[in-house]
Image (cartoon, coloured by chain):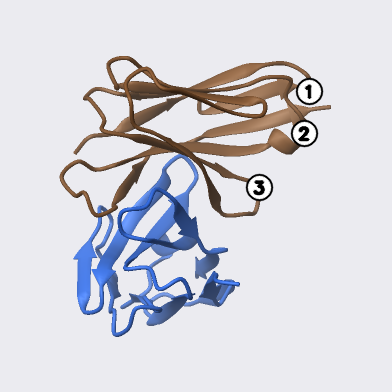
Amino acid sequence: GQQVMQIPQYQHVQEGEDFTTYCNSSTTLSNIQWYKQRPGGHPVFLIQLVKSGEVKKQKRLTFQFGEAKKNSSLHITATQTTDVGTYFCGYLMTTDSWGKLQFGAGTQVVVTP
Amino acid sequence: DAEITQSPRHKITETGRQVTLACHQTWNHNNMFWYRQDLGHGLRLIHYSYGVHDTNKGEVSDGYSVSRSNTEDLPLTLESAASSQTSVYFCASRKRGQDTQYFGPGTRLTVL
């Protein structure tokens, strides 16, 4: 089935810097979701995007869905130590509209004070 | 408050033993899911259920089974544990038609 690739797999960021992580698909997606998992914790839902070119912001986090709906990005400005964790993108499989999510492998973010 | 719980949180077992991991949610969600998480693989779907008596295989279902006798619970059984099943297991639930999927705290399983 469809797969999403997350880039980079690992991101080392200095506190205060900005960074972006990407989620790419070879086929068109009907939606994209982002989750954050703190070290030792469980994934927590952040946001869902469904429209072409959609941009949503949550404080220092900006989420974007590409115009072709084949990619998405998460941009974090002025990184803080609280941003440490793994960020997963996922999508609802179009063959199953009831709610089965397919996830990427995640981007692990480490923040240096 | 409504929640999703998993038990046990940590489990060590031996190869060949049967193991059951419990998942309980109090949101009355129709959809429930089991994932395993391994380094480099992200979250992989094992089994899922869309309601009582409904169960479906995910992408890595071999060696695992589930049953759904009520809305609240979806226990995951490893029929004969193998070392390759050493992993962190997450249960999740989601209300049909809504965006947010809620994950339990996870169970760390070690098979020796």
Quick one: which chain is blue? B
Q: Secondary structure at mark 2?
A: helix
- Closer to the N terminus: mark 2 or mark 3? 3
Disc 1 target residue? A15
* A96 horizontally vs A59: left or right: left
- Disc 1 crowd, CA 10 A, few/some/many (<14, 14-19, 20+): some
Q: Determine whether A90 is above or below A25 in the image.
A: below
> Which labelled disc corresponds to residue B4?
none
Mark 2, mark 3: which one is toward the viewer?
A: 2
Judge by depth and name the residue closer to the eye, A87 or B11: A87
The residue sitting at 47% across, 62% down in the picture is B89
Judge by depth and name the residue closer to the eye, A85 or B73: B73
Residue B18 in percent (x, y) is at: 37, 82
User: Are the residues at dot 1 and dot 3 in contact (C-beta closer than 8 Å)?
Assistant: no
- Disc 2 crowd, CA 10 A, few/some/many (<14, 14-19, 20+): some
The residue sitting at 37% across, 61% down in the picture is B95
Disc 3 target residue? A39
The residue sitting at 15% across, 45% down in the picture is A95
Q: Secondary structure at mark 3?
A: loop
Q: Determine whether B15 is above or below A34 in the image.
A: below
Residue farthest along the left direction in this orientation = A95
Disc 2 target residue? A81
- Amino acid bearing label 2: Thr
Check the rendered structure and report the hue given to chain A: brown
Judge by depth and name the residue closer to the eye, A26 or A57: A57
